[in-house]
Structure formats: C-alpha cells, structure tokens
Amino acid sequence: MNPFNVAPADALPLLETWLEGREPAYRVRQIMPRLWNRPIASWADAGELPATLREALQASFPVPRLRRAAHQVSADGTVKFLWELPDRGSVESVLIPEGKRRTLCISSQVGCAFGCVFCATGRMGFGRNLETWEIAAQVREMALDRAYGVPTNVVFMGMGEPLHNWEAVDRALTILNSPDGFGIGARHITVSTVGIVPKLALLAARPEQFRLALSLHSPTSKQRRELMPVEKKYGLDDVMRALREFARRVTFEYVMIKDKNDRPEDADRLAKLAKPLGALVNLLPLHPGGAPGFTPTPPGTIREFAARLRALGVSATVRRSRGLDIDAACGQLRTTVLERARGKVAADDDTGVEQEAGV
Ligand code: SAH
Ligand code: SF4
C-alpha cells in the first residue's frame, strides 16, 4: 500500500507502522500534510524532516507526479493540461478561472467505455482506470504550481466515466474533500455521470454533500439509446428511480444537438422529468470537436428551449463554450443563466459553474 493511493485516514496508520523503529512517532504529523495539504514536489523539499528520513521516504514512497506533457492557454483564460501517466497513457484536465473561482475539470479514466456518439473521449474507447493518486494528482499538480494553486471547485467532467471507476473515485473524493487532503468543500465537488445505477447508490450513501450531474441528453429512452449506448443497460426509468432515492438536488446535463433532441416537445418531456426532482437543467452547446456528423443546435433555438423549460417551472442554464480555441475537452463549463425560476435554485448553488442572471 502506498500513502498516496489511499484516503488520508488510511495513510496515517500505514505511515505510523512504517515509522516504527525508524523515527519517533510524532514525525507522522509532519509527514501527513506533505501528502496533499502542503504538497512537495519531492521528499527532498520537506526541509522540516531530517535528511535520513527524507531519503527513506523517497525510497519507500516516492512522490508520484504527473508529467505535464503540454499545456495550452485559451484567449478566455481557460487552461488545458495534458498529463502523461507513468505507463505513457495520457489524460487531460482543464482549469477554468472565473472571478474568484477556479474550477478544475478532471479525468477519471483513460478513454471511456460508454461510447456516447457525440463525445471525443467515447470515440477513443476504454484505455484503463486511473488510480486514486492519478485522479488526486491532477489537483495536486495545481497546488504545486504557484501560478494556479488549489482549485476552489472540482468537476469530474474530463475524460472517463467516474462511476465506472468507483473505488478510485470514492477515495479521490475523500482526498479532495478531507481537511487532511485538499479541504475542498463537498458542495464544490461535482461528479458527472451517465447514471451507473448501482454506483449512484454508493455515491448517495456518502454523508458528504457532493454534487451530482446526470448526463441525460434526451428525455425518452428510445431517443437516448441512439445517443448513449449505456441506455440499454441502465435505462431512463431506472436512473430516474435512483435519482429520486438520491434525495439531493441534481443537475441534468443536456447536450443540444440539432434535430436530435432540441424540439419543443423534447423540452416539454424534459420538464416533466426535471420538475418533480427540482433538478436544474444545464444546456450544453454541442462541442463540434467531439462529434463529426452532428450539428450544434443554433443559439437562438437553445434560448427558446431554455425559455420553454422556464415557462414550465424548470431552472435552466446555458453553458458558454470555454476554451474553444484550444479545443478543451470539457470546455463547456462556464454557464450563462438564461432563465432562473425564482426560488428554484438554492442559495448555495455553488457547483463551480458560473451563472449570470438576466441574460
Ligand atoms: N462520463 C461522464 C463525465 C465526463 S463527460 C459523463 O458523461 O457525464 C462530461 C460532460 O461533457 C457530459 O455531460 C458529456 O455528455 C459532455 N460532453 C461530451 N461530449 C460533448 C460534446 N461534444 N459537446 C458538449 N458536451 C459534451
Ligand atoms: Fe464517456 Fe461521458 Fe464521453 Fe459518454 S460523455 S463517452 S460517458 S466520457
């Protein structure tokens, strides 16, 4: 076991055992913050520890790093990072600065097994699951870089399906949220999923108020199946049932694709799903990079669709594409609130998706 690959509460006894017969027990209190809280690039940098201990730590538990293979800065301030993994696979993170907020969009897998037809990651197919440390290290690398620092918000909207890698994501959520980890508030951490029903229950069972975004993209099972093969396994009815049990406010992600899911009757059906749950609907303009053969819904139609949802009493936001010029994988996070039904969106609606009223 490696202290970087487990939750802080499990790293503690592991390090205590490792220290026995080597160094006084209190050293563990100096080592722990160096995992995540006050991270170091290498144990050699932990100046408060004796040199022999630093060397022993480096030999037993070398600080795992992601190699920054590339980074691109968009004209709108969005930064895309390409991380090379130890086995030479690679994943992306995207940092979206907005005022005081810095939202980091992170990956949970290399590629993705779910093959949604509009998604660039889906077309790559499945590579492998990221390990816990590889997920958390996307945040750790930010913390190590003075230019960025620990993000205020994290969204699992990069590559991969987080609930298909639940065990590692489960531990990574703890590292992100725990005071012994990065201390990012649970309400500032969003898990986005196509709805792996058995795993939704495990996320719901966690006591922290992590946010859930459900990638819906279509209001009927038949139509959803054409866009998202996962519908065959976990159908809309089952997903909706799981969401009712989730008993926390959910956001529906809805990629707008011309002539596929953007008709007025789609809005009406979508409202019927969203309203009883009090769900917020996030309309995502289709990012053309992921989907040759599909056309984005024109902005005017998206506005009408959002207005129709609002008229039916559903809160709807439209994401403004971010980082289009650098082709950011999840550069659709910044949101403009088109319509916000008064009182529907809770005051703590702080998912990291900026919302500007009255546009
Ligand atoms: N696998 C998870 C999380 C990663 S994808 C999920 O699907 O929810 C994050 C979001 O980006 C999802 O809502 C996904 O549908 C959306 N997305 C994927 N391809 C897109 C594209 N070409 N344009 C706009 N949004 C896209
Ligand atoms: Fe996978 Fe999400 Fe892309 Fe679908 S949208 S293929 S689940 S990453």
Image: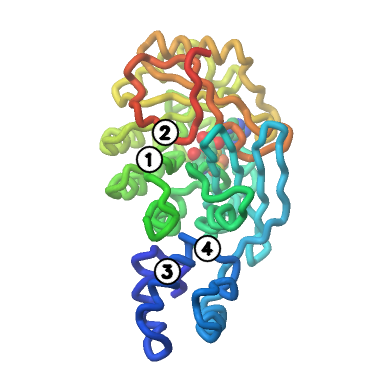
Q: Are marks 4 and 1 in contact (CB under 8 Å)?
A: no
Q: Is disc 2 placed on a helix, strand or loop?
A: loop
Counting from the top left corner in percent of width and height, residue 105 is at: 55, 43
Q: Give the residue type that dot 1 points to.
A: Arg
In the rendered image, the vertical position of residue 337 relative to residue 230, given as above or below:
above
Chain-order first, disc 2 or disc 1: 1
Counting from the top left corner in percent of width and height, residue 111 is at: 60, 50
**Mark 3 against mark 2, which lies toward the viewer?**
3
Identify the residue under disc 3: 32
Q: Which mark is residue 39?
A: 4
Chain-order first, disc 3 or disc 2: 3
Residue drawn where x is 56% and y is 50% of the image: 149
Q: Is disc 1 placed on a helix, strand or loop?
A: helix
* Residue farthest along the front direction in this orientation: 48
In the rendered image, the vertical position of residue 155 relative to residue 244, given as above or below:
below
**Mark 3 against mark 1, which lies toward the viewer?**
3
In the picture, which quadrant includes the N terminus? bottom left
**Mark 4 against mark 2, which lies toward the viewer?**
4
Identify the residue under disc 1: 187
Chain-order first, disc 4 or disc 1: 4
Q: Are marks 4 and 2 in contact (CB under 8 Å)?
A: no
Q: Give the residue type that dot 3 points to.
A: Met
Chain-order first, disc 3 or disc 1: 3
Chain-order first, disc 4 or disc 3: 3
Query: Depth check: 85 or 57 in front?
Result: 57
In the rendered image, the vertical position of residue 236 relative to residue 158, given as above or below:
above
Q: Quadrant of ligand 2?
A: top right
